[in-house]
Amino acid sequence: MAAKKQAVDFEKSLGELETLVNELEKGDMSLEDSLKAFEAGVKLTRDCQSRLTEAEQRVHTLIESQGEMSLQTFNNPDAG
């Protein structure tokens, strides 16, 4: 259940980050609001990166626990 909660939190954080980026790109915000949005974006980025690192470590541990420690390339079809 905790993994599902983390996934939801990750998706929510990523969505918030996308919204902030869109707002900043419009250029309609005051300097002060832009700085606040940028600061929030940095925090969200760090949070998302931390969650991705945790997920990577969990996958690494699962592979290692199966006695098949080998690095494999992950081909993401969504990556350009």
Image: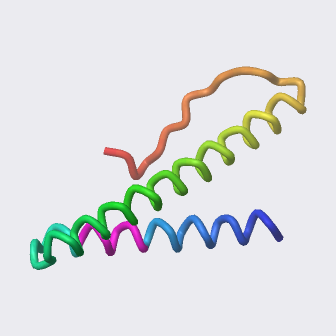
Is residue 18 within the magenta segment?
yes
Residue 61 rendering spot, x and y as whole percentages:
81, 35
Outermost residue toward the left?
A: 27
Count the labels in the image: 0
- Magenta residues (range): 16-22
Is 1 above or below relative to 77?
A: below
Frontmost residue, 20 versus 1? 20
Is 75 above or below relative to 26?
A: above
Is residue 20 within the magenta segment?
yes
Residue 14 rendering spot, x and y as whole percentages:
46, 66
Frontmost residue, 69 versus 41? 41
Residue 22 location, quadrant: bottom left
Q: Quadrant of the C terminus?
A: top left
* Direction from residue 6 to residue 12 in the image, left or right: left
At 59% from the left edge and 48% from the top edge, which residue is drawn? 50
Is 23 above or below relative to 66?
A: below
Residue 69 rendering spot, x and y as whole percentages:
78, 22
At 54% from the left edge and 56% from the top edge, which residue is drawn? 47
